[in-house]
Image (cartoon, rainbow, N blue to C red):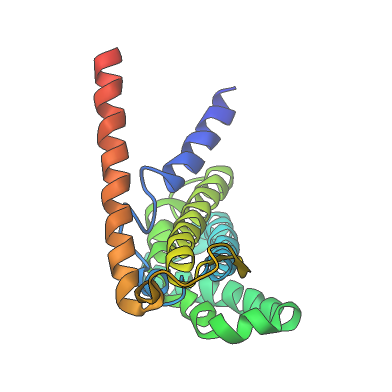
Amino acid sequence: MANTKTSMQLVSRGILSQNPIFKLALSMCPAVGISTTVMNGLLLGIAVFFVQVCSSVTISLFKNKIHPRIRIPSYTLTIATWVTVIDLVLAAYLPDAYAKMGIFVKLIVAFAIITMRLEMFASKEDVKDSFWDGVGMGLGFMVGMMAIGFVRELLGLGTLFGYDILGFKPLLFFVLPSAGFFVVGLMMAFFNWIEIAYKRRKGLQS
């Protein structure tokens, strides 16, 4: 039971209290550039999830064999290896989607959230905890991207997953890059409000 609870805590932390986009404000480029639809957010989220989990497990497995002076190049090489794998898979099996977001998949190598988790967690913890930390951070990024895509696609295009929902395009502004910063800012405020409200409620109950 204790192990299950710890695993769930690691996962929930990545989704909520340390959400890469809304709480840590990391990897903002894709959050703004590619999250114009829910599907785009989902596909990039899956790619980041895969790279984060595989990189975390890899670094945790070999952490004792990595010299401290080359740890950052080691992280970069590890991330680049797994990015190459997911890049080839998406190009082979989802060519249409890959054509729209291919450049962002390649940029995962430079995503600060992945490198940060390898340095702060995977390089210090065991494989099991590193796996669950990677799952939490990967899911947190995916949830953030899909949430932003949901708002921008619905309000900008009147669709969800490409299906016409509203029958018209309410505010095309939301599919522009500048709207990405606007939506992210609002969702950051919303996440902070939820956290504050939860802490106040917990304090009152205790």
- Residue drawn 59% across and 30% down? 4
Q: Where does the N terminus fall, quadrant-wise?
A: top right
The picture quadrant where one finds residue 160 is bottom right
Q: Relative to 147, is 189 on the left or the right?
A: left
Residue at the extreme right of the image, as rendered: 93
Is 21 positioned to the left or the right of 93 in the image? left
Residue located at (35% from left, 78% from top): 177
Residue at horizontal 32 percent and vertical 72 percent from the top: 179
Residue 59, given in percent of the width and then of the height, sits at 52, 60
Instruction: From the top left corner, tell me how far across and down residue 62 is, in percent.
Output: 55, 60
Asked if residue 70 can be seen in this view, the reply is no
Comparing 121 with 11, the one in front is 11
Closer to us: 59 or 27: 27
**Residue 78: x, y in percent?**
54, 71
> 153 or 134, which is in the foreground?
153
> For this view, does 11 lie left or right of residue 113?
right
- The residue drawn where x is 50% and y is 48% is 136
Q: Quadrant of residue 24?
A: bottom left
Q: Quadrant of the C terminus?
A: top left
The answer to whether residue 102 is seen in the rendering is yes
